[in-house]
């Protein structure tokens, strides 16, 4: 595994801890090694010390001595200028040859580009030019690209085109870390591994779907990146669209990568395009003002480090999405995401229609419970089914109760960064949980018109929500207009 951006945050927080967890569970072979590549000039020994030191903060419990030794022996580093294909890429080539010989590794390489996206095509091109990218003599060469994959439809197309000139599509693994989360993968098992949910999973029974990806943190140290991205770009065409497609797709004919991704892509193509009018009515943006989270005062977005003082970037976005197909026609998918909201959780709420209330004429409509399935993606992973039950007593009265499945209670603690499964899948050549070029483009095609309108008409009311609240009032009105409400509790 060759990691570009090896001294960066992602490598420290996610990649090495994930590799450690994989090794611990016995998923890494003996003939495996890691070559870190970064701009800094570091000796391999110093890099080893650094990664082992960093590991302590991001794995469960104290590091296992034998495993640490195992890693140290297999970790190498080389540094230099990514633009200089003569020196750096030659060094990488020499180092790979040495490492392969020492650890008896067949020349199967996978490259993790944890670099800014501007470098993707450049680095992949240089790897290829140095004879390390072409799949030949039975050896595979795979490339993982971190998000963001483009910043609008045009740039994503350009990037796909540039990479397509260098690599075959089946060598390209566009990562979306949401697909590494257990509960996200469980959506498919829940829907298609059981026979009782699928018959009611459609417009005849479902009233609406709500997807909330709420964060309590602000932009932290990432103001520079975030101010050029915003909440919509950062979360919706990637993480939230993954959640939508898995929730809405038809059963694939098999779990082969392309069968699953074909069905996901069909949903993306069926999402109703946003006209400029729709953007005004069905899309809401917000930016946080100063406020408080966890009882601590926090600054306004515009006062964050590396953020423009008059920034027009949104830190909150909510959309009403319609899917034009037979299963979902007229069932709104309301999605929202934001920084510095009052809670941190990600849920998918499947809201079923009300039962005909003929039998309960004497019960006021508000007291009749409706059925709801809540898929809890994080922090507490699980699934809850809400239904009505008779309250004890001589009079027939209904109350809301639930059946709850909680991953932790049922299966115990599983230690995971979310990257283990994705790294393992790339090594075994399974691209099911990675985005294909057409999916990335279809996603940008949906959100680009919204970005265009928002750019053309700057928000006049920013900042429009206090940090630590549930976002701007317009987001509530988006649902109230349809006679619905956001579900602002996690259960
Ligand atoms: C990243 C975004 O892709 O996902 C961040 O760039 C966001 O802004 C993060 O905080 C959320 O991921 P998770 O796994 O914490 O929900």
Image: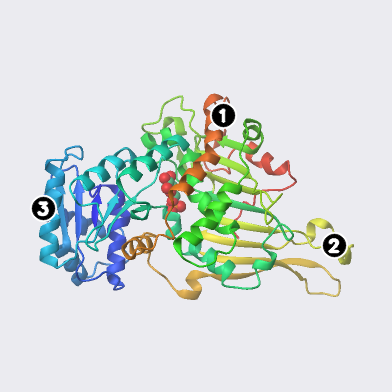
Label 3 or label 1, whichever lies nearer to me, is: 3
Dots 2, 3 in contact, CB < 8 A: no
Given residues 156 and 300, the one toward you in this image is 156
In terms of depth relative to the viewer, which is nearer, 185 or 468?
Answer: 185
Residue drawn at 53 percent across, 45 percent down: 337
Give yes or no for contact between labels 2 and 1 (Cβ–Cβ under 8 Å).
no
According to the picture, the residue beneath numbered tag 1 turns out to be 453
User: Can you see residue 295?
Assistant: no
N-terminal label among 2 and 3: 3
Give the mark nearer the N terminus: 3 vs 1. Answer: 3
Work out how far the residue at label 2 is from the one at label 3, CA to CA, in angstroms: 74 Å
Q: Which residue is mark 2?
A: 357
Label 3, residues with CA under 10 Å away: few <14, some 14-19, many ≥20: few
> Could you say where residue 378 lies in the image, as x and y percent from the top left?
49, 59
Q: Is residue 292 left or right of residue 104?
A: right
Q: Which residue is mark 3?
A: 94
Residue 36 is situated, as x and y percent measured from the top left of the image, at 20, 52
């Amino acid at each position: 595994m060759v990691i570009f951006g090896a001294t960066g945050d992602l490598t420290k927080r996610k990649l090495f801890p994930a590799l450690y967890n994989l090794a611990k569970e016995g998923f890494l072979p003996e003939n495996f090694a890691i070559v870190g590549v970064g701009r800094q000039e570091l000796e391999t020994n110093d890099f080893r010390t650094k990664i082992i030191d960093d590991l302590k903060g991001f794995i469960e419990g104290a590091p296992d001595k034998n495993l640490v030794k195992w890693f140290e022996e297999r970790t190498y580093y080389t540094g230099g200028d990514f633009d200089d294909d003569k020196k750096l890429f030659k060094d990488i080539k020499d180092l790979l040859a040495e490492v392969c010989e020492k650890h008896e590794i067949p020349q199967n390489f996978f490259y993790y580009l944890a670099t800014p996206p501007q470098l993707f095509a450049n680095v992949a091109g240089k790897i290829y030019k140095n004879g390390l990218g072409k799949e030949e003599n039975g050896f595979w060469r795979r490339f993982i690209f971190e998000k963001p994959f483009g910043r609008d439809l045009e740039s994503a197309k350009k990037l796909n085109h540039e990479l397509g000139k260098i690599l075959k599509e089946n060598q390209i693994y566009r990562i979306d870390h949401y697909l590494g989360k257990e509960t996200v993968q469980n959506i498919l098992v829940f829907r298609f591994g059981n026979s009782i949910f699928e018959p009611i999973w459609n417009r005849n029974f479902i009233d609406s779907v709500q997807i909330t990806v709420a964060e309590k943190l602000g932009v932290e140290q990432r103001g520079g990146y975030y101010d050029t991205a915003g909440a919509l770009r950062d979360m919706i065409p990637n993480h939230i669209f993954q959640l939508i497609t898995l929730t809405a797709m038809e059963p694939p004919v098999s779990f082969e990568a392309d069968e699953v991704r074909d069905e996901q892509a069909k949903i993306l193509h069926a999402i109703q395009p946003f006209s400029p009018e729709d953007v005004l009515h069905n899309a809401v943006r917000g930016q946080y003002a100063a406020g408080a989270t966890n009882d601590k005062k926090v600054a306004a977005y515009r006062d964050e480090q590396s953020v423009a003082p008059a920034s027009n970037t949104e830190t909150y976005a909510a959309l009403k999405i319609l899917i034009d197909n037979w299963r979902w026609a007229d069932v709104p998918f309301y999605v929202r995401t934001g920084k510095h909201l009052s809670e941190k959780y990600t849920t998918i709420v499947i809201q079923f229609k009300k039962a005909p209330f003929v039998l309960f004429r004497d019960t006021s409509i508000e007291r009749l419970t409706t059925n709801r399935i809540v898929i809890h993606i994080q922090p507490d992973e699980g699934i809850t089914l809400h239904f009505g039950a008779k309250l004890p007593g001589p009079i027939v009265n209904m109350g809301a109760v639930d059946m709850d499945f909680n991953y932790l209670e049922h299966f115990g603690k599983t230690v995971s960064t979310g990257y283990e499964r994705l790294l393992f899948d790339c090594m075994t050549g399974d691209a099911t949980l990675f985005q294909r070029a057409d999916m990335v483009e279809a996603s940008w095609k949906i959100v680009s018109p919204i970005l265009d309108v928002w750019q053309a008409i700057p928000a006049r009311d920013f900042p429009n929500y206090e940090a630590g609240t549930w976002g701007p009032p317009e987001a509530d009105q988006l649902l109230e207009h349809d006679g619905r409400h956001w579900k602002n509790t996690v259960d």
